[in-house]
Image: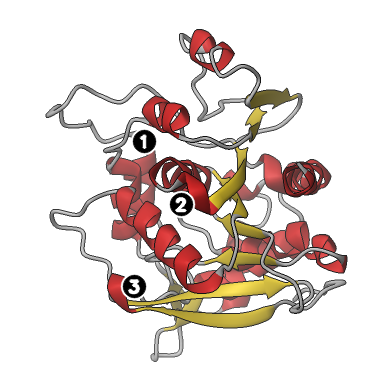
Amino acid sequence: MSSSSEAPRERTIPLPSRGGAMAALEFGPTDRPIDIVFSHANGFNARTYRTILAPLAADLRALAIDLRGHGATSLPTVIEGRDGWMEFRDDLLALLAQACEAPVVLGGHSMGGTSSLLAAAAEPGRVRALALFDPVIFEPPPAGTPMADSPLVAGALRRRASFPSKTAAFEAYQGRGAFRTWSGEQLADYVEAGFRDAGDGEVTLACAPAWEASNFRTHNYDPWAAFRDSRCPIRILRAAEASTFRLEGHEADLAATGGRIEVETLPGTTHFLPMERPERVRETLRACVAA
């Protein structure tokens, strides 16, 4: 269903301390250290970003990973009593220790961007720069306050989990909902890695609706503390329409970083700005590597 100037290499990276293995797509020359580790949005997978990242492979080496509960990653997904997005942070840190020989640029979209920020705050020495694409940043609720279920939670729980085939899933999604601004090639890549054989002639979502809903429901982190604790340059591209990066009230926090954090709002973009403006994603990642 898709083609590319660069065919990524599939990798499985054992993370025994985390209870399984992480799946990844690797781009670029193998005779250089990894430059970029890229993390996807909730409910998606590494292959969704293949066409966005592939042009970087001419001279940079990048890993696009499947986060816990997504794609082909085999890390356990226990919803009851889970530790929320700190799980993704710790998975990322384990991956960096296992697969990267030097500090890298962490890039990420939405939940993947926030997880990258949390990792950079926890172990600043492993991260040389952050490239965040409409990360999920908002004021955390007071300690002990349960978060009310959002429309995103309800939508995830209603999501159709099975289709007769990947082709049927592609046709059901094309031009609709979150996918309305995507190219056909981007959607085909999402479907290719986002569904697995159910064994009964159908295909089923690799990211279970209950897991996706759990990620929307669980925000047990303070992103502004993470910004303060990080030490590297941070470049953020923010959606113009319904951004998940809630900057209001924190302008002074950004100003206090002395220019270490740069935020740009891209006109005409939605939360899916990586799919809408892939050239700006690549430009930002390259600038972070060069910094």
Q: Quadrant of residue 118?
A: top left
Q: Amino acid at mark 3?
A: Leu
Disc 2 element:
loop
Eye-nearest disc, 2 or 3:
3
Q: Quadrant of residue 4?
A: bottom right
The circle drawn on residue 151 is 1
- Which circle, 3 or 1, is nearer the viewer? 3
Residue at image point 40% right, 31% down:
223
Q: Measuring from the top left, give residue 212's x and y in whole percent.
A: 36, 54
What's the residue at 79%, 46% (across, down)? 290
User: In which quadrant will I find the C terminus?
Assistant: top right
* Label 1 residue SS: helix
Earlier residue among tags 2 and 3: 2
Three-letter amino acid code of the residue under disc 1: Pro
| Comparing labels 2 and 1, the label whose residue is closer to the camera | 2
Marks 3 and 1 close (CB-CB < 8 Å): no
Badge 3: how crowded within 10 Å, few (<14), some, or many (20+)?
A: many
Quadrant assignment for the N terminus: bottom right
Label 3 sits on residue: 75
222 on left or right of 289: left
**Residue depicted at 63% across the width and 73% down the height:** 25
Q: Of helix, strand and loop, which one carries label 3?
A: loop
Q: What crowding class fits label 1: few (fewer than 14 Cα within 10 Å), some (14-19), or many (20 or more)?
A: few
Relative placement, left or right, of 7 versus 224 is: right
Considering depth in this image, is 230 or 275 the residue closer to the camera?
230
| Amino acid type for the residue under numbered disc 2 | Asn
Q: Nearer the viewer, residue 110 or 1?
A: 110
